[in-house]
Amino acid sequence: MDTLGHLELNKTALVTIDLQRGILTGHHFQPHAGDKTLKASNDIAEALKNTAALIALVNVNPSTIGYLRPFEGGRQGLKRFPDDYSQLLMTIANDETSHNVIKVTKHNPGAFFGTDLDLQLRRRGIDTIILTGVVTSNGIYATALDAFQYGYKVIVVEDACTDRDPQLHEIFFDKLLPKIALVSSEELILEEIKEAY
């Protein structure tokens, strides 16, 4: 794990990726179970609740998922998704006492392309992103890469991310993510947040 340095909460955002009912429910994730990944993200969000930090909860619109796989049938391959597919499972998503939470719906693997996430972060002076969610080899990496290219300091929390393929998770965390981000753990992030108060 990398040395993170000092977190400035007023310049930090937790960005959670695709922690929603239709993705987490009924799928097998490795090396960390989906509920463990969700709990780790919830713990970090709770530590940042009503602080100077921002919490950005990102989900994906199911009606556009079919278009992300154009070689698997395109429009003919689109299927009907349950109404609650995009429902965020983060505890803080429905917490009306939280004043530092925004929600972003994406239509691509990454959370930046085609959304106002970059605008929302920049207007608040955010320069550091703590990234959690699913899946490592898709939404997490795509978001981390865009954030890096936009000039953000990116911290990816390994045990708050997971994949459907444990080998891909390992490859991304061993080989790819360290080139564009700091790799951390839930324990280290929570310690850094506590020290930042």
Image: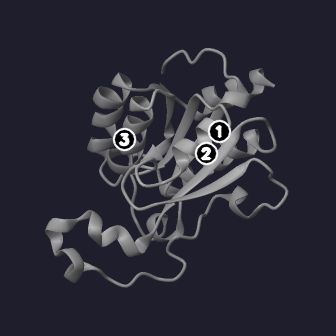
User: Considering the numbered disc 2 on the image, is that residue within a helix, a strand or a loop?
Assistant: helix
Quick one: which residue is furthest to the right in this view? 97
Q: Where is residue 142 in the image (x, y as percent from the top left)?
A: 36, 44
Instruction: Answer whether residue 191 is visible to the viewer in this image.
Output: no
Q: Which residue has dot 2 on it? A: 120
In the displayed structure image, the side of residue 51 where residue 123 appears, left or right: left
Check disc 1: other Cα within 10 Å, few if <14, some if 14-19, many if 20+: few
**What amino acid type is highlighted by mark number 1?**
Arg
Q: Please say whether residue 23 is visible from this viewpoint.
A: yes
Q: Earlier in the sequence, mark 2 or mark 3?
A: 2
Pointers 2 and 1 in contact (CB under 8 A)?
yes
Q: Please give the residue where the numbered disc 1 appears in the rendered image.
A: 123
Residue position marked by numbered label 3 in the rendering: 141
Figure check: 195 above or below 118: above
Q: Which amino acid is tagged 2?
A: Gln
Describe residue 69's horizontal placement relative to residue 114 as left or right: left
Which of the two marks, 3 or 1, is nearer to us in this view?
A: 1
Disc 3 versus disc 1: distance between alpha carbons? 24 Å
